[in-house]
Amino acid sequence: MSTVLDVEQLSSCGNAVEHDIETPHGVLHVTMRGTPKGNRPVILTYHDIGLNHKSCFNTLFNYEDMQEITHHFAVVHVDAPGQQETAPPFPTGYQYPSMDELAEMLPSVLTQLRISSVIGIGVGAGAYILSRFALNHPSLIEGLVLINVDSCAEGWIDWAASKLSGWTSNIVDIVMSHHFSTDELTENLELIQTYRLHIAQDINQDNLALFCASYSSRRDLDIERPTVGLNEDTVNTLTCPALLVVGDTSPAVEAVVECNSRLNPTKTTLLKMADCGGLPQVVQPGKLAEAFKYFVQGMGYMVHSPSFPSLLFSHLSTESVPSAGMSRLGRSRTTSSSSITSMDSSRMRSLNSPLDAPGGGGLDNQSRPQTMEVSC
């Protein structure tokens, strides 16, 4: 699949405004497109190691279906400290923020930009940061899309492997193996070369090493799957709807499945993308945009579009819409945290939305406690 890394298009379209925001743990560079609209949340993104908001999210947000959604939402792209384009190197001895501290920088962003709540989209390290943010500040998060999320601390085997690889590999090789499987590194040569050059040439290498070290030192999120009707209000878990996304050949598959097994099954959807590796937002932007559209609709925000002229963009009560609906992407559920319900594209297109008629056979997350898992 041909993939072109366009880091200019997003910044040149729309009314993007860049901000350097002071936080308790340093300055954070953010880019905002649009203005908050009524009581709707703002979409907030956070990228993975080796990337910035442009290289991580341009392909997705430039996709026509995603632009259809963002026409109704303001968007804030967060760049981790020192990872934005032309970022200067940190001074010698600079203490890079921990993952917890990076999460605690986000409330300052919302306060200064006058944002009351967000729907987060995070990849890898960014998914971890947004998860920690949601655990600490649940009232500020309405929903999360977590791509390649790893809720666990780095194990000692992983730590030893990273140390050994660090002696024989440079930071670019380490980051590439984080993003791509061995097969993908040898098969999708155009994509690999594009991102290898970007990581090596566009990201300050010393700053990148600090961000990578912070991510490698992350703590376990210590989330626990609640028992529905018993301890939902007392266990440490995400309280907002969550869509977990991973490519079927991604190095993060096991970590994402493990995270899914720890989350509230009534509010969590696991989406495994076929023919996709470590960057689903780049390789399969259409599928991810469609998944996001129905995830947002499941939260009660209805997208009006030429394809769905009867769906008006408004906020509905949570009683009338499933909290983590995936509409056309699937209706089947499974009690297994690792099995995936297979669904091809033609079947996805033929399924009716549970939002077509109130009470008309849609997903009932309260009466069906199993996590919804789909593959596309």
Image (spheres, rainbow, N blue to C red):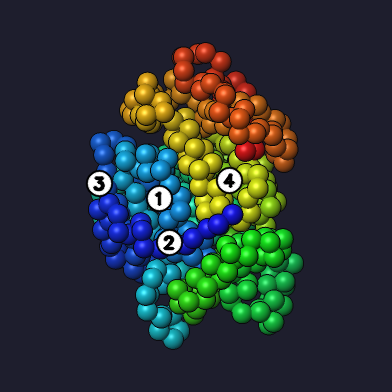
Report if residue 29 is visible in the image: yes
Going by the numbered disc 3, the residue's amino acid type is Thr
Q: Position of residue 189 (x, y in %)?
A: 63, 65
User: In the visual, does 174 lie left or right of 131?
Assistant: right
Task: Give the mark nearest the N terminus, 1 or 2.
Answer: 2
The residue that label 1 is drawn on is 62
The residue that label 4 is drawn on is 245
For the residues carrying marks 2 and 4, which lies nearer the camera in this image? 2
Q: Quadrant of the C terminus?
A: top right
Task: Give the mark nearest the N terminus, 3 or 2.
Answer: 2
Vertical position of residue 61 compared to residue 163: above or below: above
For the residues carrying marks 3 and 2, which lies nearer the camera in this image? 2
Task: Give the mark nearest the N terminus, 4 or 3.
Answer: 3
The residue that label 2 is drawn on is 6
Task: Give the mark nearest the N terminus, 1 or 4.
Answer: 1
Q: Secondary structure at mark 4?
A: strand
Q: Are marks 1 and 3 in contact (CB under 8 Å)?
A: no
Q: Quadrant of the N terminus?
A: bottom right
For the residues carrying marks 1 and 4, which lies nearer the camera in this image? 1
Observer-nearest of 321 and 138? 321
Label 1 – label 4 distance at C-alpha = 19 Å
Q: Are marks 1 and 2 in contact (CB under 8 Å)?
A: yes
Going by the numbered disc 4, the residue's amino acid type is Val
Report if residue 178 is visible in the image: no
What residue sits 37% from the left and 75% below the top? 86
The residue that label 3 is drawn on is 35
Q: Secondary structure at mark 3?
A: loop
Q: Quadrant of residue 46?
A: bottom left
What residue sits 50% from the left and 26% below the top? 322
What residue sits 51% from the left and 38% below the top? 291
Label 2 – label 4 distance at C-alpha = 23 Å
